[in-house]
Image: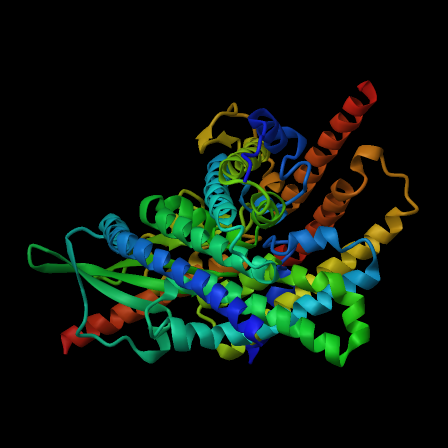
Amino acid sequence: MAKETFSVKKIFKDGLLDQNPIFVQLLGMCSTLAVSTTVINGIGMGLSVTFVLVLSNLFISLLRNYIPSKIRIASYIVIIAGFVTVVDMILQAYVPSLAESLGLFIPLIVVNCIILARAESFASKHEPLPSVLDGLAMGAGFTAALVVISALRELVGSGTLFGIKVTPAGFSPAVLVISPVGGFLILGALIALVQWLQSRRKKED
Amino acid sequence: MKQYLSLGSRLALFVASVVLMLSLVNMLTRDTIAERQRIAGETARGELLSGTFTEVTDFTIPEAEAKTVTAVYRAEENGVVTGYCFDVTVKGYDEMTMIVGVNTDLIVTGVKILTQSETPGIGSKAVDENGAFLPQFKGLSSRNLDSVSIVSGATVSSVGIQSGVRSAVTVCSLILEGKGE
Amino acid sequence: MANIFLLAITALLIENFVFVKFYGICPFLGVSQKTETAVGMGLAVTFTMTIASALTWPLYYFVLKPLQIEYLETIAFILLIACLVQLIEMFLQKAIPSLYSALGIYLPLITTNCAVLGVALLNVQNDYNFIESVVYGFAAGLGFLLAIFLLSLVRERFEFAKIPKPFQGVPIALIAGGLLALAFSGLRLSF
């Protein structure tokens, strides 16, 4: 098979900006809303998803000629669920506080649409190296978006960043922002902002 | 039919390899997880009562409380029992586990939440260790447990915790009575 | 009995799966433009969640736990759910073709709805017995149905509303969802 050519720059630009999983592809909303109450949770979730994305992309790409198309979704889910359980066990053993605060959303990475979407649309059609890079790039885009949302919510909702108080003493936090209601409103506003920026860029082009 | 068999066996092969990988990782992490849970329990108990702790095995928790109080530890200092710590599981909106310390005078020495998943910004107020709710329990006995003020907007969580503390005190009084006989 | 009732009310209204627990957000946003399809999706999810709760309970307590392989619960549950959805699809195709063609494309999506896997894992985490698990699965599914139905009613009105361009589509749906969540949190605060 001919070596396929790919552009590292394009893969990363897609993952971080043009095809950002949260802001543009609008995938993985459940975990985004649920864990973005503190920056530490956001980063922890982002890195866990990145880990699963990279490994599942790698293995699905390696096995892509051995997975019959009729049972491909089931096979992807088995592979993804395997790596998710690995992350779950590692977090419980070495970062228990994070495992505690992310709770059920760690095992629920299995049904995070981002991972299945990359398996189906990228890893199953490309060679291992670009697939791994795609996993890294999409994971980085997911993590970056989570950091933006969770930093905003933690700062306004608790007056802290990384759990450390950063706001002046007179600031009273708007608890609504870290409650479920605030999650919906903030994410809606941020996606609207991204869509506005996109339409402005298109006009300039 | 033959096609289904071949598809099925292919999928079974994938499942088998993933299960193999998981059992390996489980072997590597299992002991660390158990050890970590043990240390977390030890540390929490140490903050509630002083002395060394041994799990109480010669006392059967009465059936009415057995679902709530899951384990009892005796604290001893220089051979004298100073009190008991109780592993307590209660339901807020989801399950919470906590440790309640009670001394030999049946006074609550404190409540520590070990695991909880209350909604941030709402139920979480009731489980905040530096919040207004949890520290209230310190120094109370079975007679004035009702005097704690419930967190408004987190009633279910606070009432859950309150009932857990009451169960712990009840079991503690049973243990102490048993000793007197 | 009172406990079961409280559990059902909690799952349906107070701790609504969508508005408080954030399970099933993808279909909540993706399949809520039209009331008809939203209700179809909600019913299919409710059905799957009830059956999945009834099947994962014995799987956990009669297979995984005795064999001490609880760490395989995620993978075992998702496989069971995937098979279940496949069976429901085949059954509907043969038995009720009209419902099948109405739900057709949404059926495979149920496998990746985190509300289904979520309820199975929650049943185990919260130590529910068999009856409680099934009731919880059913009530949580109804909670999802209620949420997606309410949002679809709001979104149908959007067709006649003048919405700023950047807010069209998902952003305004999220904001409508947020306002619905606000109403639900009011319910919660009164308990």
Please state if B102 lies on the left or on the right of A88 as rendered.
left
Please state if C183 lies on the left or on the right of B13 as rendered.
right
Residue at 58 percent across and 66 percent down: it is: C82
Give x and y (percent) for residue A7: 59, 27
Near-viewer residue (A79 or C98)? A79
Near-viewer residue (C144 or C73)? C73
Please state if A37 lies on the left or on the right of C156 as rendered.
left
Camera sees residue B146: no
**Quarter that holds the C terminus of chain B:** bottom left
Give x and y (percent) for residue B6: 52, 69
C80 up-or-down from A19: above or below: below
Q: Which residue lies most toward the left here?
A: B78
**Quarter that holds the N terminus of chain B:** bottom right
Residue at 49 percent across and 42 percent down: it is: A45
A10 up-or-down from B46: above or below: above
Residue at 77 percent across and 61 percent down: it is: C38
